[in-house]
Image (spheres, rainbow, N blue to C red):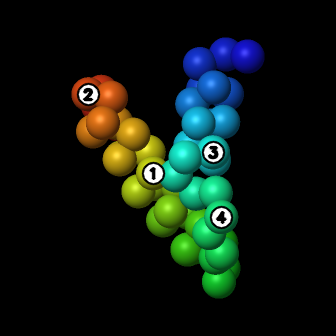
Amino acid sequence: MNRIELEWQQLKKHEISGQMFDDELDLAYAVINGIEARGERNNYGT
């Protein structure tokens, strides 16, 4: 897997797993928030 695939795997596993979304927009916001949270924790820019 390349880096983005590994990052997506971690995002799904740790940031958005177990959540229910009313629509695609809610899912999109959860992905964005998850990426930002992972970036802050791992000290890299998004």
Mark 2, residue position: 43
Q: Are marks 3 and 4 in contact (CB under 8 Å)?
A: no
Q: Nearer the viewer, mark 2 or mark 4?
A: 4
Q: Secondary structure at mark 3?
A: helix
For the residues labelled 2 and 4, the Cα–Cα distance comes to 25 Å
Indicate which disc, 3 or 4, sits on the residue closer to the N terminus. Answer: 3
Q: Residues within 10 Å of mark 1 (few under 14, many from 20)?
A: some
Q: Secondary structure at mark 2?
A: loop
Q: Position of residue 43 (x, y in %)?
A: 26, 28
Q: Secondary structure at mark 1?
A: helix
Mark 1, residue position: 34
**What kind of residue is marked 3?**
Lys
Displayed quadrant of residue 6:
top right
Q: Position of residue 27 (x, y in %)?
A: 60, 67
Q: Position of residue 30 (x, y in %)?
A: 50, 62
Mark 4, residue position: 18
Q: Nearer the viewer, mark 3 or mark 2?
A: 3
Indicate which disc, 3 or 2, sits on the residue closer to the N terminus. Answer: 3
Q: Residue placed at 63% from the left, 47% from the top?
A: 12
**What kind of residue is marked 4?**
Gly
**What kind of residue is marked 1?**
Gly
With respect to residue 11, does 17 lie above or below? below
30 on left or right of 36: right
With respect to residue 15, does 41 lie above or below? above
Instruction: Please give the label number shown on residue 13.
Output: 3
Indicate which disc, 2 or 4, sits on the residue closer to the N terminus. Answer: 4
Q: Position of residue 44 (x, y in %)?
A: 30, 27
For the residues labelled 1 and 3, the Cα–Cα distance comes to 11 Å
For the residues labelled 3 and 4, the Cα–Cα distance comes to 9 Å
Q: Are marks 4 and 1 in contact (CB under 8 Å)?
A: no
Indicate which disc, 1 or 2, sits on the residue closer to the N terminus. Answer: 1
Indicate which disc, 1 or 3, sits on the residue closer to the N terminus. Answer: 3
